[in-house]
Image: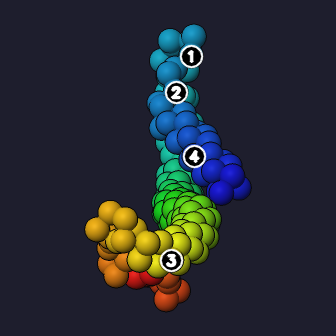
Amino acid sequence: MDQIHSEIVSLKSHIQVLQQERAALTIINEISGDNTPSAMIEAYRRQARENAQLSVELKGIDDAIAALTNQLHHKQAQLTRWQVESKELTIHQQLEEAKKVAQVHAERINELAAELTSEIRQLKSSADYLSPLYWQVYYKPFITGFKTISVPYVRSDGEVWTIVNRIV
């Protein structure tokens, strides 16, 4: 991308030099110093003789400016295209980095879900042991709601991630 920037700057400077040269050639040289009729006649005759060559030279400069301008537009379009692609690449890289962070969180959630599932099962086994005794003493259940306990779990089909509730 830096190379294209330098090429664009170079093309612009070449175009500017040619435009300045063209402007210098189109300025009618003023009759210098000597305002005598013979000096003025000689200056105008010299300008008339050089006019054909000047026209050809101006045409060449105009053609060169047109060609360089065309190249400049091509390079600018190429630069714009690369900037868009670079931006898309940057967005893609950001997306990949964010997915890695999300993957870490999803893995941690799944680890915690496994731990929580284990703890809930241990609690349920304790409750299963204590419930008959608790009923005998207090005439009510020790813990209720084990049929509806669920823990979050993150799964993916490769494209879409889904958080589901697993019933323990």
Q: Which residue type carries mark 2?
A: Asn
Q: In this figure, which residue is indicated by the disc labeled 2?
A: 29
Q: Which residue type carries mark 3?
A: Tyr
What number is the disc on residue 12?
A: 4
- How far, Cα to Cα, is label 2 from label 3? 114 Å
- How far, Cα to Cα, is label 1 from label 2? 8 Å
> Image quadrant for the N terminus?
bottom right
Closer to the observer: label 2 or label 4?
4
Q: Secondary structure at mark 1?
A: loop
Q: Which residue type carries mark 4?
A: Lys
Residue 166 place in picture, x, y as percent = 42, 81
- How far, Cα to Cα, is label 4 from label 1? 34 Å
What number is the disc on residue 32?
A: 1
Image quadrant assignment for residue 43: top right
Contact, mark 1 vs mark 2 (Cβ under 8 Å): yes
Q: In this figure, which residue is indicated by the disc labeled 3?
A: 129
Establish if 11 lies above or below 42.
below
